[in-house]
Image (spheres, rainbow, N blue to C red):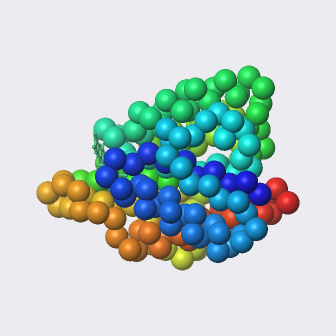
Amino acid sequence: MQVLISYHSDYGSTAKMAEAIAAGYRAASPAARVVVQTVTQTTLDDLAAADVILLGTPVHMGSMAWPMKKLIDEGARLWMDGALEGKVGGVFASGGGLGGGGGGVEQTLVSLHSNFLAHGMVVVGFPKSLPGYADGGLPWGVYGRTGNHQGMPGGISDASLRAARSYGAHVAEIAGRLLS
Ligand SMILES: Cc1cc2nc3c(=O)[nH]c(=O)nc-3n(C[C@H](O)[C@H](O)[C@H](O)COP(=O)(O)O)c2cc1C
């Protein structure tokens, strides 16, 4: 099983989530080949070669960071041939989250779903029964809240990273069921 975890990160929080998801995936599925790379390193061939694709982004002005959107728009070329149909997808994001809500994280995660579903992929959410859900779970994927009460970067918590690891293990389990 070929697994691609592609992310954008300016300050390192989303990158840490990507590594935590990879660790969870590898622990749950030791035979899987898990590649973690930045979205700018990711080519359309990488997407087409993967059985499982996880995309992660910081929340920027209530939406995904533009390098992720650039890959998604370029990836529309793969849609012509149905090259991603039937693959399994998962999503993750970090955001400052100033205020009572999430600063746009849910719509960011769901917009990543839209891309996967447009390609005919299957999207894996994050069931509330799983370890770590209370710290970083959303039905749509995994989230790390990184801002402090002044709206400034505070870094990602170990609890959020444990949630990310749990999500990685869950995607591995579901992908194993669907693709083997
Ligand atoms: C240009 C920019 C816009 C941002 N907009 C939002 C936002 O709309 N909502 C939010 O919750 N956080 C926002 N943030 C905070 C980042 O999402 C947050 O610090 C994130 O964890 C950074 O991830 P990174 O360390 O992987 O770069 C913004 C940060 C930047 C740099």
Residue drawn at the location 62% of the way across and 30% of the way down: 75
Horizontally, residue 151 falls left or right of residue 120, namely left
Residue drawn at the location 34% of the way across and 60% of the way down: 145
Q: Decide: is 84 above or below 164.
A: above
Q: Residue 89 at what x, y percent from top left?
A: 65, 49
Residue 124 in view: no
Quadrant in the picture for the C terminus:
bottom right
The residue most toward the right is 180
Please count the marks in the image.
Answer: 0
Residue 129 in view: yes
Q: Decide: is 76 above or below 41.
A: above
Residue drawn at the location 40% of the way across and 74% of the way down: 159
Residue drawn at the location 76% of the way across and 33% of the way down: 83
Q: Residue 48 at what x, y percent from top left?
A: 72, 38
The residue most toward the left is 150
Q: Residue 71 at what x, y percent from top left?
A: 54, 33
Q: Residue 82 at what x, y percent from top left?
A: 77, 30
Query: Closest to the observer: 164 or 2?
Result: 2
- The image quadrant of residue 96 is bottom left
The residue most toward the front is 41
Query: Closest to the observer: 138 or 180?
Result: 180
Horizontally, residue 141 falls left or right of residue 25, namely left
